[in-house]
């Protein structure tokens, strides 16, 4: 006899119970900034930058595994560990950098909100204030946990990029060749693009976010293999979405020589080549991703800054108990939303600037992480295996190498 | 005259002897671990015992009794009259400030929370040099980065200064010893004065190592109260990392129904080990409660209750209570039985106190019984308790034999937990 079918809500409950930090982190990873970078990369370089997703994927898994391991073994946040072991000066530098970069990143999220709603004919002067106020209320009223779950369901809609991509009739054989043997000239703009892709796939603030969600979930070392599965699934989802966004833009915009600057342009530009349905799906995905990250980013940033400097933090605290936390959170939100509302604001320079800052911070945060995770006093028997260190250190050196190359190249051309 | 100075300003200073020979660079200051309260030292401030120095790559500890600190032209100078290595006995009984306090979390006993230390303030008086306070304010943070002076100069123009905040040494407890190679024999005696539920909040916020360390230093009574207040995840972590003996000792001090709740969270094997280690009397009570399903009244009830035969006099009953010294919540509902041990009535503590000692219980007892069965559903409890304004409901089986009582706290806690899971 067949078992009675479980109701939709019962299934949903099981789905949530097994959902882990890796999958959530993976979903937050494809934010407005990411979607923008991937679309521009696809439109400009066609399939030729798809290969960058493979090393990004490997590094992403290695880094998140280290984060999860550190969180489970120590029960301490990454900000705590950096402050306690790297000293106050490095901490100050990292977190002031993180704060500025994240204000820029949040601005990009609001640009995503504004852009995607414009596709549906809603003015940014309505969408941005409404969304930012709702995001603020959500957190201050303490219904954040519920919201996180709802967003997560919606973030499945990111998979609609697969539909968008398929509607553009991509050339699979060309994609294959491009991954194995990319035709790419190395110059300032292509290197900047590569750093952009790596930097948005492995954003520095994600490391902090990942580690605290592992702690919050109360995971144990003996269940680590499940955590690994969770991380791999999250990373695959992240990279898959990135892949299809690049493919969608490459097979329509690049082929027809359309240049874009924003994710919104991609949504608009898809229309004549892939139909208005594809364009709307793209815009909807962008909207959900932007709101999701616009909620989490300011909150996460306020939290790590407070953790590092020893202020009380947490959404379960009242305003009087944790004033620094709420002032920071509100401040980041207001500044970012306000920048978008300034007519003719230099949005592209802001998003570029925050990406460069991300690119500088990433190797520093990674170096701190690798040193911490190799510290026997902190990690005991769970220090890095040689393979983790090889991949970790090579990622750091390549990132630093690329950034230096980006600085040096203009002098030779 | 007293000279006060900050730990951060002394780090990295070169030390010379009287002949201007270089001895080393300061890299840590060690203070007494368990300072004793004396007449000169009313607040039990820890005295500086030794300095940790670095000479190129070699580390060395020197005794502090021959060292003097002075301020010359706004800079600190440290001089050592006679270089003498600090003995291992002194080093092992001392607390290195940089390794255990600076940048670490400590417990602010008055504020009842964790704070991060930005700097340590020390003072030299004629009896010696003491650590007097920790700096947890914004000014301390900026001083470390080297910005406090310039920022303060700017702020002065606006008639304000950087906010600074100090906590005196006797109002803090250092807890993070993860950077030490040797284990300190510290007992966190000051923590026993905190309210268990504040202590539980603090412990939940700590790293994994510190959680177990702080918890195991508490005396059994306090530890039991704290364990009750912790979130299930923290309870499990602590019980899994505590020695079996200590864990069993703590659990014995807790009410059986609380222990049963924790056992449900643990892995069956660990729970069995703990129950075997506990005294049989306590563990049997727990095992009884563990028999019940999660949604049954039996899983929520406490099997520690007070009952008297209805022919007892008020005087006898009160004597018995004085002998048993029951917990507060056991008195919420005092049960009265007949000769066959069946529940027939309840009586309030108020009635026992106001009636004359010769009165027999059946003359004053309340026979309008409201009870539930041990296999009833938990959901029914909240309604009963609010409808009849009760603090505890007696639980019986079908033969009217008493099984226990459900206390209002347990019902409220259950409701809150259910609310939480619905929201999440």
Image (spheres, rainbow, N blue to C red):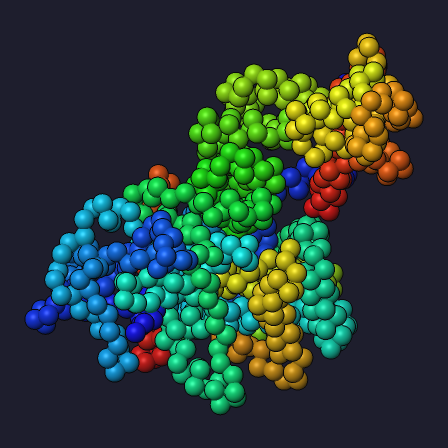
Q: Left or right of B69: which side holds A221?
A: right
Q: Residue at x 51, y 26 (%)?
A: B248
The answer to whether residue A80 is above or below residue B136 is: above
The mark tally for this picture is 0
**Residue A248 drawn at (x, y percent):** 60, 60
**Residue A168 drawn at (x, y percent):** 64, 59
Q: Residue at x 87, y 20 (%)?
A: B362
Q: Residue furthest right?
A: B368
The answer to whether residue A86 is above or below residue B94 is: below
Q: Residue furthest top?
A: B340
Query: Which quarter of the figure has residue B26?
Result: bottom left
The answer to whether residue B147 is above or below residue B342 is: below
Query: Which quarter of the figure has residue A161?
Result: bottom right
Query: Which quarter of the figure has residue B71?
Result: bottom left
Q: Left or right of B169: which side holds A106?
A: right
In this orientation, does residue A187 appear? Answer: no
Q: Residue at x 41, y 77 (%)?
A: B148
In this orientation, does residue B243 appear? Answer: yes
Quarter holding the N terminus of chain B?
bottom left
**Residue A308 drawn at (x, y percent):** 47, 61
Nearest the viewer among B239 and A187 is B239
Nearest the viewer among A145 and A251 is A145
Q: Residue at x 22, y 45 (%)?
A: B89
Q: Left or right of B23: which side holds A66?
A: right
**Residue A388 drawn at (x, y percent):** 36, 46
Q: Left or right of B405: which side holds B53?
A: left
């Amino acid at each position: 006899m067949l078992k009675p079918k479980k109701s939709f809500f019962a299934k949903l409950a099981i789905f949530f119970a097994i959902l882990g930090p890796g999958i959530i982190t993976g979903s937050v990873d494809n934010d407005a900034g990411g979607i923008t970078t991937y679309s521009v990369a696809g439109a400009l370089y066609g399939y030729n930058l798809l290969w960058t997703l493979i090393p990004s994927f490997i590094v992403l898994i290695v880094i998140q595994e280290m984060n999860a391991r550190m969180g489970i073994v120590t029960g301490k946040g990454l900000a705590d560990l950096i402050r306690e072991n790297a000293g106050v000066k490095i901490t100050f530098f990292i977190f002031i950098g993180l704060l500025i970069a994240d204000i820029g990143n949040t601005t990009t999220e609001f640009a995503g909100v504004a852009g995607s709603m414009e596709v549906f004919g809603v003015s940014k002067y309505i969408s941005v204030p409404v969304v930012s106020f709702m995001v603020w209320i959500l957190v201050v009223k303490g219904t954040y946990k519920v919201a996180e779950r709802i967003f997560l369901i919606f973030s499945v809609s990111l998979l609609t990029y697969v539909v968008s991509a398929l509607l553009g009739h991509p050339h699979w054989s060309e994609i294959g060749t491009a991954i194995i043997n990319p035709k790419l000239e190395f110059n300032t703009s292509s290197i900047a693009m590569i750093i952009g892709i790596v930097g948005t796939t492995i954003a520095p603030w994600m490391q902090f976010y990942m580690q605290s969600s592992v702690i919050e979930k109360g995971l144990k070392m003996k269940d680590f293999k499940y955590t690994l599965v969770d991380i791999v699934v999250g990373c695959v989802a992240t990279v898959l979405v990135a892949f299809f966004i690049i493919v969608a833009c490459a097979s329509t915009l690049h082929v027809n020589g359309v240049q874009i600057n924003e994710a919104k342009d991609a949504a608009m530009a898809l229309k004549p080549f892939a139909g208005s349905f594809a364009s709307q799906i793209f815009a909807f995905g962008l909207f959900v991703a932007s709101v999701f990250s616009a909620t989490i980013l300011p909150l996460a940033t306020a939290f790590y800054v407070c953790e590092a400097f020893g202020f009380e933090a947490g959404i379960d605290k009242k305003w009087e108990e944790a004033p620094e936390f709420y002032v920071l959170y509100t401040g980041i939100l207001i500044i970012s939303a306000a920048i978008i509302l300034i007519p003719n604001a230099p949005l592209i320079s802001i998003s570029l600037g925050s990406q460069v800052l991300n690119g500088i911070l990433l190797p520093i945060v990674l170096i701190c992480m690798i040193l911490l995770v190799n510290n026997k006093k902190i990690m005991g028997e769970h220090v890095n295996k040689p393979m983790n260190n090889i991949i970790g250190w090579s990622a750091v050196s390549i990132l630093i190498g690329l950034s230096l190359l980006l600085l040096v190249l203009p002098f030779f051309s | 005259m007293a000279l006060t100075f900050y730990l951060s300003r002394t780090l990295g200073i070169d030390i010379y002897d009287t002949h201007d020979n270089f001895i080393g660079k300061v890299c840590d200051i060690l203070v007494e671990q368990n300072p004793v309260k004396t007449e000169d030292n009313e607040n039990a401030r820890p005295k500086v015992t030794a300095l940790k120095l670095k000479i190129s790559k070699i580390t060395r500890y020197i005794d502090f009794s021959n060292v003097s600190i002075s301020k010359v032209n706004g800079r600190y100078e440290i001089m050592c009259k006679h270089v003498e290595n600090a003995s291992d006995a002194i080093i092992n009984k001392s607390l290195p400030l940089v390794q255990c306090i600076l940048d670490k979390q400590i417990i602010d006993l008055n504020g009842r929370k964790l704070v991060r230390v930005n700097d340590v303030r020390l003072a030299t008086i004629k009896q010696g040099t003491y650590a007097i306070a920790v700096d947890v304010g914004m000014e301390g943070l900026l001083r470390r980065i080297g910005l406090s002076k310039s920022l303060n100069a700017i702020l002065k123009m606006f008639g304000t200064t950087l906010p600074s905040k100090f906590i005196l040494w006797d109002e803090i407890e250092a807890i993070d010893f993860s950077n030490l190679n040797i284990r300190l024999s510290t007992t966190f005696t000051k923590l026993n004065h905190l309210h268990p539920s504040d202590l539980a909040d603090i412990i939940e916020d700590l790293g994994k190592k510190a959680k177990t360390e702080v918890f195991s230093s508490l005396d059994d009574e306090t530890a039991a109260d704290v364990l009750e207040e912790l979130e299930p995840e923290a309870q499990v972590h602590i019980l899994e990392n505590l020695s079996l003996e200590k864990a069993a000792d703590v659990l014995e001090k807790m009410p059986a129904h609380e222990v049963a709740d924790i056992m449900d969270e643990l892995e069956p094997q660990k729970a069995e080990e703990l129950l075997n280690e506990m005294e049989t009397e306590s563990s049997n009570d727990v095992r009884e409660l563990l028999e019940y399903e999660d949604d049954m009244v039996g899983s929520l009830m406490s099997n520690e209750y007070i009952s008297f035969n209805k022919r007892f006099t008020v005087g006898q009953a009160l004597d018995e209570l004085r002998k048993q010294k029951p917990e507060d919540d056991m008195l919420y509902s005092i049960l009265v039985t007949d000769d066959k041990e069946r529940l027939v009535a309840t009586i309030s503590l108020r009635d026992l106190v106001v009636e004359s000692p010769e009165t027999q219980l059946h003359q004053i007892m309340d026979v309008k019984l409201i009870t539930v069965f041990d296999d009833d559903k938990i959901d029914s409890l909240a309604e009963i308790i609010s409808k009849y304004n009760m603090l505890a409901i007696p639980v019986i089986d079908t033969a009217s034999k008493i099984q226990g009582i459900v206390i209002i706290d347990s019902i409220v806690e259950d409701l809150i937990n259910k609310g939480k899971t619905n929201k999440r």
